[in-house]
Image (cartoon, rainbow, N blue to C red):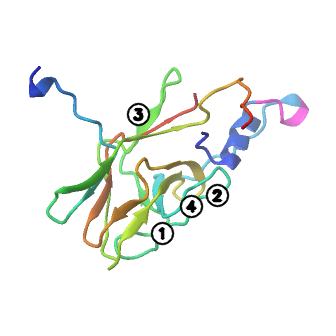
């Protein structure tokens, strides 16, 4: 496998220093109305 | 976890159910005109309320930053992503660090529609550093 075959993680947000270097980063975020429908929630 | 403002939930439900006169669909209250905005918060947002907004000044303006272009419209139930093409960017010149936990998508006038917490939060943005949300990094869907 070449380097080109290795998928890079998808970045959603990034913190850059004044020189443009990445200080921190995180994944994209998904906003959904609901993660499941019609299933009762379990009691703790 | 749901990521939509509870007022917007009722807005959508009422507009698509027989809650109007004589069983007609209810009225949808449209969000105001103008480019929608992304606001940043130092605490978590919930369905009931937005988090505590980053203080205005020093690189952040109360209400957040407007997107610069239209997102691709949903089709056949597909998700909508934002920001379109260009990242949203804030450079901290407040003199202290920002701690970013969540974001809200609002109308231009500040009516909230969607919210979400950033994975990896709280995100520390030191004075002089820049926080960016990449193009298409926020995906919004109903299912």
Q: Which residue is mark 1?
A: B62
Q: Secondary structure at mark 1?
A: loop
**How much space separates mark 4 and mark 1, taking CA atoms?**
13 Å
From the viewer's perspective, tell me whether residue B41 is left or right of residue B89.
right
Residue B131 in view in this figure: yes
User: Are the residues under badges 3 and 2 in a single subunit?
Assistant: yes
Q: Which labelled disc corresponds to residue B138? A: none
As displayed, is residue B81 above or below residue B112?
A: above
Q: Position of residue B141 (x, y in %)?
A: 53, 33
Q: Which residue is mark 4?
A: B51
Residue at 66%, 45% (x, y): give it: B8
Dot 1 and dot 2 within a common chain: yes
Question: Gap in Å between the C-alphas at discs 3 and 4?
Answer: 27 Å
First to last magenta residue range: B17-22
Assign the magenta stretch its main secondary structure.
loop
**Vertical placement of residue B104 versus B13, above or below:** below
Q: Is residue B20 magenta?
A: yes
Question: From this viewpoint, which residue is outermost toward the front?
Answer: A44
Q: Position of residue B59 (x, y in %)?
A: 34, 71
Do discs 2 and 4 share a chain?
Answer: yes
Instruction: Report crowding for label 1: few under 14, some 14 to 19, many 20 or more residues within 10 A (C-alpha).
Output: few
Q: Viewer-proximal residue, A41 or B112?
A: A41
| Upstream in sequence: badge 1 or badge 2 | 2
Which of pointers 3 and 2 lies earlier in the amino acid sequence? Answer: 2
Residue B72 shows which numbered tag?
A: 3
Pointers 1 and 2 in contact (C-beta within 8 Å): no
Q: Mark 4 or mark 3, which is nearer the start of the sequence?
A: 4
Residue at image location 78% in from the left, 37% down from the top: B26
Tag 2–tag 4 contact (CB < 8 Å): yes
């Amino acid at each position: 496998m070449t380097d080109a075959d290795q998928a890079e993680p998808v970045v959603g947000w990034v913190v850059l220093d004044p020189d443009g270097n990445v200080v921190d980063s995180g994944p994209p975020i998904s906003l959904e109305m609901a993660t499941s429908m019609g299933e009762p929630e379990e009691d703790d | 976890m749901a990521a939509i403002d509870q007022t917007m939930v009722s807005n959508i439900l009422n507009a698509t159910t027989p809650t109007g006169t004589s069983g007609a669909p209810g009225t949808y209250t449209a969000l105001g005109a103008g480019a929608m905005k992304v606001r940043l918060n130092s605490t978590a947002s919930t369905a009931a309320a937005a988090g505590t907004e980053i203080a205005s000044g020093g690189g952040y303006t109360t209400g957040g930053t407007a997107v610069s272009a239209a997102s691709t419209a949903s089709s056949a139930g597909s998700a909508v992503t934002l920001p379109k093409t260009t990242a949203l960017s804030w450079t901290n010149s407040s003199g202290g660090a920002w701690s970013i936990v969540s974001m809200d998508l609002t109308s231009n006038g500040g009516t909230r529609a969607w919210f979400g917490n950033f994975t990896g939060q709280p995100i520390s943005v030191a004075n002089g550093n820049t926080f960016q949300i990449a193009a298409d990094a926020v995906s919004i869907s109903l299912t």
